[in-house]
Image (cartoon, rainbow, N blue to C red):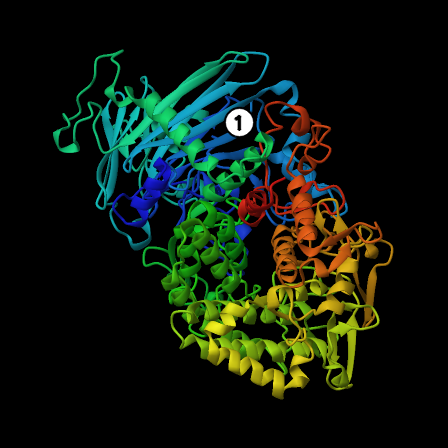
Amino acid sequence: MKAEEKRLKESNERTGHWKRWGPYLSERAWGTVREDYSPDGSAWDYFPHEHSRSRTYRWNEDGLGGICDRHQRICFSVALWNGKDPILKERLFGLTGGEGNHGEDVKELYYYLDSTPTHSYMKFLYKYPQAEFPYRRLIEENHKRSKLEREFELMDTGVFNDDRYFDVFVEYAKADVEDILIKITVVNRGPEAAQLNLLPTVWFRNTWTWQNEIADCSLEIANANSIELETAEYGKRWMHFEGEPELLFTENETNNELLFNAPNQKPYVKDGICEYVVDGRNGAVNPQKKGTKAAANYKLIVPPGGESVVRLRMTENDIYGKSAALAPAKKIAPKGETFTAFADFDSIFDLRKKEADEFYANIAPKDLSDDARNVQRQAFAGMLWSKQYYHYVVKEWLDGDSGMPTPPESRKEGRNHKWTHLYNADVISMPDTWEYPWYAAWDLAFHCIPLALVDSEFAKEQLILILREWYMHPNGQIPAYEWAFGDVNPPVHAWAAMRVYQIEKKARGVGDRKFLARIFQKLLLNFTWWVNRKDAEGNNVFEGGFLGLDNIGVFDRSQPLPTGGKLAQSDGTSWMAMYCLNMLAIALELSTEDNTYEDLASKFWEHFLFISDAMNDLGEEGLALWDEEDGFYYDVLHLHEKHYSMPLRIRSMVGLIPLFAVATIDPEVLEALPAFKRRLNWFIENRPDLTENINCLRTPGMGERRLLAIAYRDRLERVLKYMLDENEFLSPYGVRAVSRYHKDAPYVLHVNGTDHRVDYEPAESTSGLFGGNSNWRGPIWFPVNYLLIESLQKFHHYYGDDLKVECPTGSGIMMNLWQVSEELSRRLSRIFLRGEDGTRPVFGDDAKMQNDPHFRDHLLFFEYFHGDNGSGVGASHQTGWTGLVAKLLQQSGE
């Protein structure tokens, strides 16, 4: 067992709390719903970036490349000042939803380079310009641009010209559970010596102001090189600093005088260190050297091409390595003395990095290139750095705090007012630490697949957490995300649970049936919610809202239709068919040891039959989602009063999602479950009206397996002809969300004097739906591509070499479906890998990103990718579901 594996084992058994400290500090807490107490729900405006340095957060803290404990009582991050900026660089800057021409967007260059699952070693990189940071210009230039123009980025401002910037590397290594070593390396990439104030900062999350309480925590100087931290929960800690930096203290309290023209509750406030360093105001920090926020001010002059290294240590021990109880009070060490806090510092760092290499060497395939290993390692790093402490108690947020003004009356009927049971105070995998610093239910399910490769216990905990009674609504709905917990995301939780179970079982040789049973019981409640709430007509055709695909439709599917009537959704119905098969698979797995699950397996098999029938054979009622003429699945608009139904003939991912609903049952499983087999055969014998709309169950497939699928062979082949056509869905970099066919033939629906249309848009969207920063009208998205790959593998599991298709369509190259899945996997991975010309598609035409040795091997895992050239689009750090590339490289190589 490797050292990191031992730490994981100790963490799982609660004998060593190695995950107590981690990268759980968000990159953005301002502009969030949690901090919004406005009457109209304008979160971005209520708590803007301009307030963040001076105003205390109610729910979560943020910082630059920082860490905190899992309850976020003690926080640490890095602050910087280049001598020119008007403020300290304490957090990442970006545009709000209203400022960007494509919605909110972080405007910084930062990278998550490494992390082990217990965070025993982590590495972060921030690129800080030596010129004044162009805050105002970024806002003004993007404000001028239309949705038809590309975004104005930090690199476009010229602040990185002549390499006049600092690379700031922040590394962490744990000597023990409560002994954290921190190394900050500042590299001057420019041609001249440059000044930098480096301010490692430690503070307490403010938990006292809101109820008019007194802080139960304190920071104070211990000696010239150390700060003593004390909290009621954790007792005493010490932060030791190498050298003798200037130690600055203030309070984590709002500067009411600056922001609201009201008296400050205390003389020293949150932005006091900023005012002292940047504005030279000596009275802004506490001369008594105590408070609830503190920083060590290192004044560095970094030579051209050179570097400066600062070492810190946060530990339960004093500077002499003794126990806290024996620490000499306020003893000042002789100047120039080498502190024992750093005697073993470098050797521990070297060991932890070596252990990280050993851990990941076991995960990457042996024949993976160094470049692909780097891509996979950084994908895992981004996912692990995106674990955040998320705090949001909806009832308290709605009611307000006793020590603060009463929230507006409109809040009682506003956002999330029906989710008063929701109590969030956990470390959760986030889609993105800046753009999406809040959990999203269906994103989380995809996160857990690659996470299961490195930390299956954490993956299982995440899936269980979102179904706990203080998360799941009493009616069975899973919370979507903080902007609207009641929105509807695709029901992929059961799929993720089964996949995590299978991944862990393959790695350990035994599956966690207790986990599977626990999650199955809760998912029964969620499945019932779907059936009761989203099958409006009671005919097994679902209309679940936009279902996470944002603007893929011709109009906003989560709002009342401008036409009236109902929309029978091909994707909504297919997601439910997939849900049935996922629940069936779990029930069959549990039935091998407990035959009481056979009844539930039969129930989900029956439900799948009804949904499949609704998808394929409601033609007599005018509701069929399959279009025989086109050979494709479409949404169908049903107007009750006119007894009229119309397919919306948009060739999009909506018509490919029916392929997700596929499963095979091996003969030995049926033989082991006679009751289920008997019921299955009963349906085949007595309900041909239902079973004729799925694959013929009497026909043996490969190895006499049984196939359950919405798209049986003929329809599968017809859909794949579109999907694998490079003039339609198939890009060199994966499957597009909308067919390229619509570039020259946009879909237009004329309603009440208005044209509603869908064009092929391979990058940023011109539509304002959902804030305009998301696009499902042409780009490549990893989550649905990954499900397509798995579906093809399942179909191959049944058909084998008996079914081959042209890939690409019209090429004359025949492949079985497993080979097609591998081809899709290679195309997706190609986005990040360096090609024969040395470039990576993800970087597009950015010459510096492609060629500069200090940029070209640092990866960004975007939200989605250009449908034609593979360049990254959308949120630049959504490693969450794009981190699936780590799993693709693990299972299919390059």
Relative to 219, 566 lies left or right:
right
Mark 1 lies on residue = 85
Disc 1 residue type (three-letter): Asp
* Farthest residue, direction bottom: 686
Residue at (69% x, 28% y) in the render = 838
Above or below for 97 versus 465: above
Q: Nearer the viewer, residue 641 or 827?
A: 827
* Farthest residue, direction front: 703
**Residue 576 location in percent, x, y?**
59, 71
Above or below for 663 versus 52: below
Quadrant occupied by the C terminus: top right
**Residue 449 location in percent, x, y?**
51, 52
Residue at (69% x, 47% y) in the render = 823
Q: Nearer the viewer, residue 747 or 83?
A: 747
Quarter of the image holding residue 871? Answer: top right
Residue at (24% x, 47% y) in the render = 214
**Residue 814 location in percent, x, y?**
78, 52
Residue at (27% x, 43% y) in the render = 16
Relative to 345, 364 lies left or right:
right
Relative to 832, 44 lies left or right:
left
Q: Nearer the viewer, residue 376 or 273?
A: 376
